[in-house]
Image: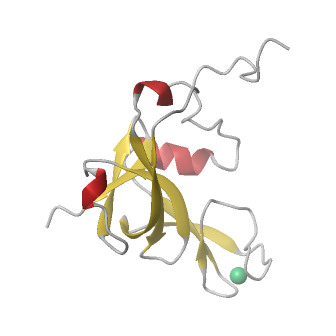
Amino acid sequence: MSGAAGGRSRFDLPEADAFTRAYWDAAAQGRLLVRRCGACGRAHHYPREFCPHCWSEDVAWEPASGRAALYTWSVVHRNDLPPFGDRVPYVAAVVDLAEGPRMMTEVVECAAPELRVGMELEVAFREGVPVFRPTSR
Ligand SMILES: [Zn+2]
């Protein structure tokens, strides 16, 4: 083995398959999508081909508002996987989307001491990857 990287040069851009391509194409255009179930009405994230709440396959893409509340976070001081090594420290976070789903992401444009549970965030995009920043209101 020549390392666990397996030839990938960066780890923040997931390899899109046919199913997730819609999500990443939208993100590249600055739009965040979630999946909503037509059977139970609940939204979920990350995107799955069936509803994780009721297992229905009646699930469709829907544009998200981009609003979220900070649930928890961790300041990452070391990450050897590119490109994260050049970005430390950064704020790895879990946010609650306004639509309901919880999402792993990164909070930007906010110093760590300013972070508060429940603080309002809005989606931003960095190189086609959704991240969140404090609302500009
Ligand atoms: Zn469902």
- Between 119 and 101, which is closer to the camera in this rendering? 119
Left or right: 28 as drawn, with respect to 134: right
Residue 18, percent from left and from top: 70, 44
Of the four image quadrants, the one with ligand 1 is bottom right
Residue 97, percent from left and from top: 45, 71
Residue 63 quadrant: bottom left
Residue 135 quadrant: bottom left
Residue 94, percent from left and from top: 50, 62
Q: Quadrant of the C terminus?
A: bottom left
Residue 98, percent from left and from top: 42, 76
Left or right: 47 as drawn, with respect to 58: left
Colouring: secondary structure
Residue drawn at point x = 40 percent, y = 54 percent: 31
Q: Quadrant of the N terminus?
A: top right
Left or right: 38 as drawn, with respect to 93: right
Left or right: 5 as drawn, with respect to 128: right
- Between 1 and 44, which is closer to the camera in this rendering? 1
Residue drawn at point x = 36 percent, y = 75 percent: 118
